[in-house]
Image (tube, helix red, strand yellow):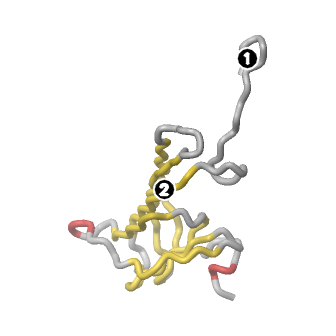
Amino acid sequence: SAPWSQSRLPKNVYPNEYQLTLELFELNEGEDEYSGTVDIVLEVRSSTYDIILHGEMLISDVVVTQRSSPNNIPLNVDCVLPFPNTQTLTIHLTEQLQVGNLYDVRISFFRALSLHGTGIFEVPFTTDPSGLK
């Protein structure tokens, strides 16, 4: 079956390292928002046009570059497809990722805080009579 329909990620690309940067904006009731980036260094173990990652569809931008390429010229991302049933995203490229190369993937995102307890969400707190929160 198709790799994006599996709950386990395929082993053709492997993350060597990753970094998450998260920014919370001014928090105002009803308008709380956050943004951030995920930077991933991927090692390609078998050639592929697709990068499949766990994630939700809150992406605003995806950039993929070959680590050793001059001038860090981005590869052309054809589309980014969410698969909610497996909580995965497929990043489809117009050119094939080559075995043995390292690629940098930068995913930027922006979203409102959730009020329903999924993802990054708000939790109201109260202060008791003694002043404890």
Q: Residue at (34%, 76%) from the top-left corner?
A: 75
Q: Answer yes or no: do the residues labelled 2 and 1 have beta carbons within 8 Å?
A: no
Q: Residue at (38%, 70%) from the top-left corner?
A: 64
Q: Quadrant of the C terminus?
A: top right
Query: What number is the disc on residue 40?
Result: none
Instruction: Name the outermost residue toward the front.
Output: 30
Q: Quadrant of the N terminus?
A: bottom right
How many numbered markers are drawn?
2
Q: Quadrant of residue 82?
A: bottom right
Residue 9 visible, this angle:
yes
Q: Residues within 10 Å of mark 1 (few under 14, many from 20)?
A: few
Image: 98 above or below 114:
below
Q: Secondary structure at mark 2?
A: strand
Report x, y in % for residue 10: 61, 76
Instruction: Name the outermost residue toward the top.
Output: 130
Residue 12 visible, this angle:
no
Query: What number is the disc on residue 132?
Result: 1
Residue flagged by tag 1: what amino acid is it? Leu
Q: Nearer the viewer, residue 37 or 110?
A: 110
Q: Nearer the viewer, residue 93 or 30?
A: 30
Q: Quadrant of residue 41?
A: bottom left
Q: Residues within 10 Å of mark 2 (few under 14, many from 20)?
A: some
Q: Residue at (65%, 46%) from the top-left corner?
A: 121
| Distance Cα–Cα, label 2 vs label 1 | 33 Å
Q: Secondary structure at mark 1?
A: loop
Report x, y in % for residue 6: 69, 77
Of marks 2 and 1, which one's residue comes earlier in the chain?
2
Residue flagged by tag 2: what amino acid is it? Phe
Instruction: Name the outermost residue toward the left.
Output: 71
Tell me the residue that label 2 is attached to: 110
Q: Nearer the viewer, residue 63 or 16?
A: 63
Image: 53 above or below 123:
below
